[in-house]
Amino acid sequence: MAYDIDMIKKVYSQMADRVNKAREVVGKPLTLSEKILYSHLWDADSNQAFKRGKDYVDFAPDRIACQDATAQMALLQFMQAGKKNVAVPTTVHCDHLIQAKMGAAIDLVSANKSSHEVFEFLESVSNKYGIGFWKPGAGIIHQVVLENYAFPGGMMIGTDSHTVNAGGLGMVAIGVGGADAVDVMAGMAWELKFPKLIGVKLTGKLSGWTSAKDVILKVAGILTVKGGTGAIIEYFGEGARSMSCTGKGTICNMGAEVGATTSTFGYDDSMERYLNATNREDVAAAANEIREHLTGDDEVYANPEQYFDEVIEINLSELKPHLNGPFTPDLATPISEMRDKAKENDWPLKVDWGLIGSCTNSSYEDLTRAASIAKQAVDKNIKAKSDFGINPGSETIRFTAERDGLLQIFEDLDATIFTNACGPCIGQWDRSDRKGDERNTIVHSFNRNFSKRADGNPNTHAFVGSPEMVAAIAISGRLDFDPTRDKLLNEDGEEVMLDEPTGIELPPKGFDVKDPGYVAPSDDGSAVVIKIAEDSERLQLLEPFEAWDGKNLTGVKLLIKAFGKCTTDHISMAGPWLRFRGHLDNISNNMLIGAINAFNKKTNFVKSQITGEYDGVPAVARKYKAAGISTIVVGDHNYGEGSSREHAAMEPRHLGVMVVLVKSFARIHETNLKKQGMLGITFVNEKDYDLIQEDDTFNLVDLAQFAPDKPLTIEVVHADGSKDTFKANHTYNDSQIEWFKRGSALNLIKIQNNA
Ligand code: F3S
């Protein structure tokens, strides 16, 4: 379980020199983000000032974390790289493959049964290659990382988009695809476009019903799901310092919801308190010694407009509690306006469930604040009108919350305490109260609320709020309940109000745990044998993708023109498909089944140009592949937003899609397409999207001259023989073009390893 204090001390010992040098090279005071980025350059001798939003830069991250769903494919890929051990401290966390149904005791047993093969595979690969392994039930990756591994000024990557959570402890922590993690595990540099910087100045102080969650709900409303794309959001100001470390974690966590590369906060007393409370006094002491380098320069925060690309100011004293949703996390509504807005939009007012916890909001402070509301229901004799579900973030949190009587308070309201795992947050929820597609409303303290995300039902209206607001709304059973204004009728027929929440930042008696659920790897794992059953449905060894023949791509058929939002959930759905994450062929049967076909507005119903008939997307793709025909996917804005799952790139690649042409990409997905040896390109003129027709054939007529900064020419041949020709941009640099040439980034790693 041990965090690597020697590694942290090494990072800190170099920090002063590197930061001072960067300040000289850049020629001005530095933000915290720049300090961390420049002190983690792969080439420490570089004397370059990088252009934000433009230059691709190689970095050397300090740590890697993988969750069980993404780790399968990442480790299957790493196994192909021919290495003895991972090059950088790495952990694997079993949290996504555990269904929430009856409660932790029963659910964990059944997950250990149903996913036994996968957990055993992950544990044995971890054991073999020097990776720390966190068992099912140990906790949710980001909470476990915050409690054990995150450190101020560090840089980490993780195969999950909410890796950004570790920004709460002052890291630059970035969600990546498994292919990126494999590069770093294999000892290679990790490449990132140098991010732009958004500064968020927090003034004032949180009070009453307003919490850290409301800061990010507000920021999401301002920036929208695209507004943070390609940027690091750096929070600063007295308001930032007044907040708890775990509150900062919540804010950073949901930076993923505005598309931000990551978010971070400068090192302060709250972080020191958290490090001490989680038994890392040595890390706090080491951080204290270089405190000035673990936060932005004073001048930057005094005149932020001069140093950030965009500045937002939020006065915490004036901030109102919000609920965001449904179906998108950036639809921000102050609680006080929900009544009108819900009526206007005909959102179902009755709330079925209040779900508290997840990686976003399961700190001790969160649980105490939510419990302070739940307790009032019992004390004031109010019967909770909705069901309660609690997902503790880790066994340490669960054990401590149980010891301190917090879980009992929720149990007194008949809450179901789910496993310390993702559960409903990732669609792993076997919901017993509603089956089918009924319209209904739930509120939760998670981060995402895309359609079908929690329970697979497209008509579940999920709203995101703070744990304490979720508790209040669940008690009232109404979406339009405003606890600052509205009264509730108790069982004695009296009108009562809920008092404002109160919380405790850190457990007064300290954190405690009996078995944290950690398994250390062997010192020498060379004798460990990794087994995959021949007939396994869940795991499949990988075959390398074919290299490019260097010629123009011609005769490429349109597979689907996706209309509107197309997230990685639409491209590679989660829920029941999670079980096939380690089996590329089987999981490919979910490829793009959530995307809306622009020509008939239906999902998973596209025309095959071979037969002229309509069928599901994977079935049509398989027929093209069998006929040796490459295909293209056309999409709208922010294509691939949502998560880091590289399956959303590997599946199309596996089923013969060679090109994804869209109005704009979400960063991680664009990189993932490149890693898998595909062409991810964007319309130069967005209106050209409208030219694409259902029976189109595409020719990439100058691909043979593929080069950085040189747009590609696309010729589209319509069914009647007429043609349109237009340009598409790409962001491939020389080494990414090399991935395309070799068929994938992994193919290139193998060649380099064998050289
Ligand atoms: Fe992700 Fe939710 Fe788990 S955001 S890590 S799925 S708790």
Image: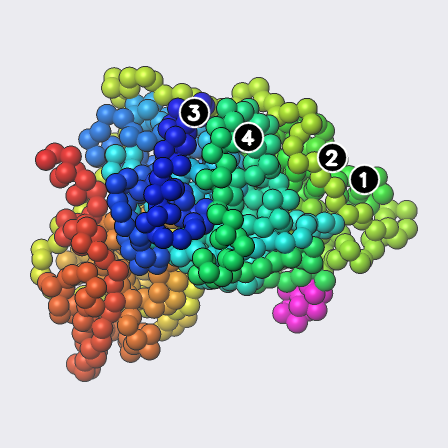
The kind of residue on which mark 3 rests is Ile
Q: Nearer the viewer, mark 1 or mark 4?
A: 4
Q: Which residue is mark 2?
A: 409
* Neighbour tally class for label 4: few under 14, some 14-19, many 20 plus, Cα within 10 Å: many
Is residue 564 visible to the viewer in this orientation of the structure?
yes
* Neighbour tally class for label 3: few under 14, some 14-19, many 20 plus, Cα within 10 Å: some
Residue 5: assigned label: 3
Q: Which residue is mark 4?
A: 275
Q: Which residue is mark 1?
A: 378
The kind of residue on which mark 1 rests is Val
> Total of numbered circles in the picture?
4
Work out how far the residue at label 3 is from the one at label 2, CA to CA, in angstroms: 38 Å
Identify the residue shown where x is 75% and y is 57%.
482
The kind of residue on which mark 2 rests is Ile
> Element type at marker 1?
helix
Q: Nearer the viewer, mark 2 or mark 4?
A: 4
Q: Nearer the viewer, mark 3 or mark 2?
A: 3
The yes-or-no answer for disc 3 within 8 Å of ligand 1 is no
